[in-house]
Amino acid sequence: MSFTTLGIVASVMLLVLLFCGVHMGVDFFLVGFIGLTIIINFDAACSLLGETLYNAVATPSFCVLPLFMLMGAFASRGGFAKLAYESAHTMLARIPGSLAIATTFGCAVFGSICGSTIATATIFGRLAFPEMERFGYKKTFALGSIGCSGSFACMIPPSGMFILFAIFTDQSVGKLFLSGILPGILTASVYAICMLLMAKYGNNVAPIHPDEYKVTVSDRVRASFKIWPIMLLATLVMGGIYTGIFTSNEAAAVGAAGTLCFGLINGELRKKGEINSSLRETARSSAMLFIIIIASMYFSRFLAVTRIPTDLANFLVTWEVPPYVVLMSVIIVWFILGMLIAQAAVFAMTLPVIFPVLVELGYDPIWICVIAMKLNEIAGVTPPVGINSFALAGVTNSKVEDVFAGTWPFIICDLIVITILCIFPSICTILPYSMIE
């Protein structure tokens, strides 16, 4: 059996294991180890595994991942989501679909200090869904707006997936964070317009509740000032990175410390066990992600030995079609794989191979990561394995089919945003390339 044939068989086996629900870290390790044992030998495969275990994470820049995850854990338990949601709802009262629109912008604001799509979707599921039911919102519309709004929060920095992208593509974490700001705002705006039109012209999709008419101008002004802790932290972290005052690691440390301080002041983190729970959650999540990173790098080394990445790259670069055809093919593959496999596994498996090809074809590396992130958002809510949809269905005691049914209008919105980003790539690149380093 040739090395290339072995690599193809191994890749198919990896997909089968992922479809069967085996943990992605185990899949990458197992397939990579067996493949390298066949190609070289058992001792050499073990030696390469040990080298990968050390070299994959033996860099100070990886500290940014657990620090930003700690910031998100403190934010999840510190009452910031409730603050963002209630303030947005008060400011948007009497607008058709105000609760859904408030959820969208609340997720955007909360995402600026959280970075976890699952946490955002589940927290806002607990906050917004009961209110939407009380106000008489159509169930699928309510669930779809919460699920998709929670998913697009990963575009707003700090984002755990952007950190993974930085590791897999060797890009600057700070630049990737900045690249997500304008596309995140664009996504929130397109969602809001869609929700407004659906509420205004739909058949009683989102009626205006009498309580909303009690909101005064002074209430709106007070609500806008209530979110100052979140805006201060977001500005401090991202502004520090943009101006060069902080490195990404330093910004993460400042953000985690600031979120802890405000959480203690608000009283939420003073509750017994909340800080310990945040630390445990961060440790578990960081360990899981580091295992995935190390395992995917080990598998990538196996693929490199088979020469599949090199042969595929040479084929795509010399393929006699316009570059946009290759790009569209990649987007379709990412879209389909995202519907079938966990998002982290999709990009851990494909980015090391596909990313250099797209860069060689002339596409901007930062822009590529933003497009991949948009597809990551879609993957989080699409059937059959949209993890955010399942999480939201669980916390709201709803059928996952209702969540999936409500997401499609917003998936169309995501495709519109991707089209806009393809036509105007500077939306993604203007901030990162103007940052002070």
Image (cartoon, grey):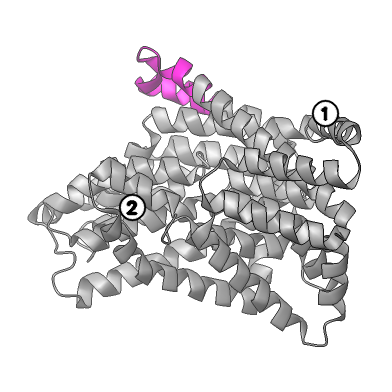
Nearer to us in this view, 220 or 8: 8
Q: Residues within 10 Å of mark 1 (few under 14, many from 20)?
A: few
Element class at badge 1: helix
**Residue 378 location, x and y as percent?**
49, 62
Nearer to us in this view, 413 or 306: 306
Query: Who's the residue at 20% across and 59% down the image?
Result: 139
Query: Who's the residue at 57% across and 40% down the image?
Result: 23
For this view, does 70 lie left or right of residue 2? left
What is the quadrant of residue 223 in the picture?
Answer: top left
Residue under circle 2? Answer: 103
As displayed, is residue 42 above or below residue 318?
above
**Residue 209 location, x and y as percent?**
11, 57
Q: Can the viewer see residue 396 in this picture? A: yes
**Residue 403 location, x and y as percent?**
30, 58
Cα distance between the residues tagged 2 and 1: 42 Å
**Residue 30 location, x and y as percent?**
70, 40
What is the quadrant of residue 40 in the picture?
Answer: top right
Which quarter of the image is occupied by the N terminus?
Answer: bottom right
The magenta span reads: 258-279
Residue flagged by tag 1: what amino acid is it?
Answer: Tyr
Foreground mark, 2 or 1? 1
The extreme top residue here reads 272
Element class at badge 2: helix
Residue flagged by tag 2: what amino acid is it?
Answer: Thr
Taken as a whole, is the magenta stretch helix, strand or loop? helix
Residue under circle 1? Answer: 54
Is 259 one of the magenta-colored residues?
A: yes
